[in-house]
Each structure stands twice: as C-alpha cells, then as structure tokens.
Image: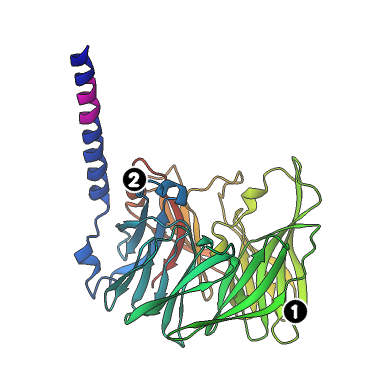
Amino acid sequence: MKKIIFFLLLIILISGLVYKLYLDKNFSASLSIENEAIKQTNFLTDKKAVLYFSTTADQDMDGKGVSLAVFIKDSGEADAFKMKGLELGSVATSQNEVLLVDKNKIRLVGDTYKEFGMDKSQYTGERTGYLEKEKLYFTVFNTGVGAKGGYDSNILYGNKRGFHKENIPHYIAASGIDQSEIVVLTQDNLKEEFHIRKVKLSKNDITTQDILKINHSKETNFSTMSAILSDETFYYFVGQKTLGEVTETIDTDIVLYRIDKNTHAQDEFTLSSYRDEKNITAHYPFNIKNSAHLYNDVLYYANGLGEVFEFETKTGKVNKTLTMKNVRKDGVRHNEELFYKDDNLYVLRHDEKLKEKYYIEHYSLTEGKKIENIKINGLNEILQSIKGKSIYSYDFKMLK
C-alpha cells in the first residue's frame, strides 16, 4: 500500500514539473523581448503601437499575475515584454519614450532606459499619463481602503531622475488631464456624491483642490463611461444614467456632462437613449478610459456597439458620425481597444475567421469613414501562450 501511495505521489510530482516546464516554454516561445533588448536606446525606432494586457487582481493572489506590453513593429509583427500583473494597467507616452507600469515596478523605455521599484505593491491601476509642461509622468492606483478607514488612491510621479509617492484620499470614478493638472471625479458612496477635484503636481509634492459637487439625482443610478476631457472653458465627461428600477430590462440614457470652469454651471446633453434594453453591457465602451476625445471643438464618444457620436462644443448639436462594421452586439469582447489622435481613430479589432485574428482599423473622424486596415502578425499566438491565467487588454496607443 505504501509503495502504491509513493508511486502516486511521484507521478503527481513529475506531472507538475512537466506542466511547469511546458508553461515556461510557452512563455519564452512567444514573449520575445528580453530585458537587454528593451533597454536599448533605439528600441522604439521600429515600433508603431503598444498594447497593455494583464491578468486581473484576483488572479494575483498566488503572486503569479502577468502583464504584457505588446509592441507592434512597423512590419506588423507583434513582440511582447512580460511583467508582473496590474489589473487596469495602462501606458503613457511622450516623444520617443514610453512609461510601462506593473504592480511593483516603473520602467521608462526609449531614448533612455530607467526602472524604479515601488515600496508597496499595487494591484489595480487607474490612470497613467504625462504632463508636458512639468515634464512629469504620473501613474495613479486604485489602492483601496486605508489604515484610517478612508480611501487611498496612491500616485507615483516623476521622470528619469526619480519618482515620488503621494496619496489622493478619495475613490476615483474618472480622471483626465487638463494642461498641467490632473482632474479627477471622486465618488463618496456613503454620501452618494461626486466631486470634481484638481490635482497639481510639483517636483516634490502634490496639492488637491475641491472644485465642485456634481448635480446628481440620487433617484438615478449613475456610472462613468469616459475619462474627463477639458478645453479652455469646460470640463466634459460621459456617464450612463439608469432610469427607474433595475429589472430584466433597463432604461438608460448616455449623457454628456459639461461643467463651466469659471461659473461652475452644469449642463447635460443626451447622446443616446435605450429603452427596454436586455443587455446594456453591450453598449459599454471597449475601454471607458479611452472612449472620448476632443478635437477642433468636437467631442467624440465611441460605445461598445461601434457607434461614434459627435458633440459640437460651440452649438451643443449631437450627431452619430460613423458606425463600425461587424461589431458584436452581445457584449462579448475579444480585447478590442480604442486610441484617438487628432482626426484619427484607431480600433484594435478581432475576427475569428481570419488567420491573424487581430488587426487595427484606422478611421477619419471628420470624414466619418475607414481609411485602412493595419495588419498585426502574431498577437493571437502571444495571448494564447499564457497558460493557467486569463489575460485582458487594458490600453492601446499608437506611437507613430
């Protein structure tokens, strides 16, 4: 009997070792960017896009969460750099430089390579960005309930000379950049209140200023659908208002909120309405943080159905400017992502029928039409190589 037990344990041990070797082989087979390669000053020269994928925070309970920075070369080939996990992680870019963040490390990649460790691991990201005037990168984390019972959103900010850590003592429902400042929409669940606040960074500290409370009816269920955008006069963000009781079908309005920076006057504009909707999650943007964009006095908003709406900031007029083709209507997502730049909208798409499952669609916003498809080779193989964990897309940026 003891021999039988011994052999069973031996078989289990060998099986575990074989699986681990298989797992490691699959990681190294597809994740081809090594530490030494990403440190080269010419690393970004032939890269035209970067994608960020990660496991969720709950998958990091064993300390084996994974994130990937997938770089798309000019030739269309995808290469991946493996890091620790960070749910809702994102990347920031400036000229010839990319900021990569995982749960315990910050990396600056490009003209110079620098990496900085964190004194505390983070598990959920909120926003990563770059303030041009201050020459400062920042990354905000949804850290969680603090030691004193309040809410902590840790922020690390800096550049190649180093990063500082501070805390924004609020839960952040949405965020954005207004020239040289970070703007956040904070949420107080106990009071059912939303506030716009400004966060000012300097080289050694931060200041947080409460601007105003959002006029929000407690009779409606509200959730954010975009980041905060700004022009000289207004703050803007898109939200979803659920009307009445939540039953098998839902009535909702997708609303653009506009706040005057000087008078604090607040206006609402309905972008679209849905009644008796059975699957409202299908309308949620591919990525809420990247769903909206301001260009030439027009705010653009793209939902999960592939519909792009435009709001003319001077007149308040709302139009549907374009509709992407072959977008799933059931809410099932395959890592679709969005990126805006000036008049351009880039969309990471997935088509199971194609040999190379992923590609990028390039649209002109002002013309309301697709310009081209940009090929990607090898992305599906990279994602399929992650064994034992589920990985999801959280950010996408074109570098050229």
Separation (CA) of disc 1 from disc 2: 49 Å
In the structure shown, which secondary structural element does the residue marked by tag 1 occupy? loop
> Which residue is more in the foreground, 357 or 169?
169
> Which residue is more in the foreground, 167 or 226?
167
Task: Tell me if residue 11 is in the magenta stretch.
Answer: yes
Residue at image coords 19%, 19%:
7
Residues in magenta, as a range: 8-14
Mark 1 residue crowding within 10 angstroms, few (<14) / some (14–19) / many (20+)? few
Write down the residue under mark 2: 386
In the structure shown, which secondary structural element does the residue marked by tag 2 occupy? loop
Write down the residue under mark 1: 315
- Position of residue 293 measured from the top left corner of the image (x, y, whole percent): 58, 72
In this figure, what is the number of numbered marks? Answer: 2
Residue at image coords 25%, 39%:
20
Task: Tell me if residue 28 is in the magenta stretch.
Answer: no
**Three-letter residue code for mark 2:** Ile
Q: Main secondary structure of the magenta part?
A: helix
Position of 18 with respect to 369 (left or right) is: left
- Position of residue 112 measured from the top left corner of the image (x, y, whole percent): 27, 78
Figure quadrant of residue 289: bottom right
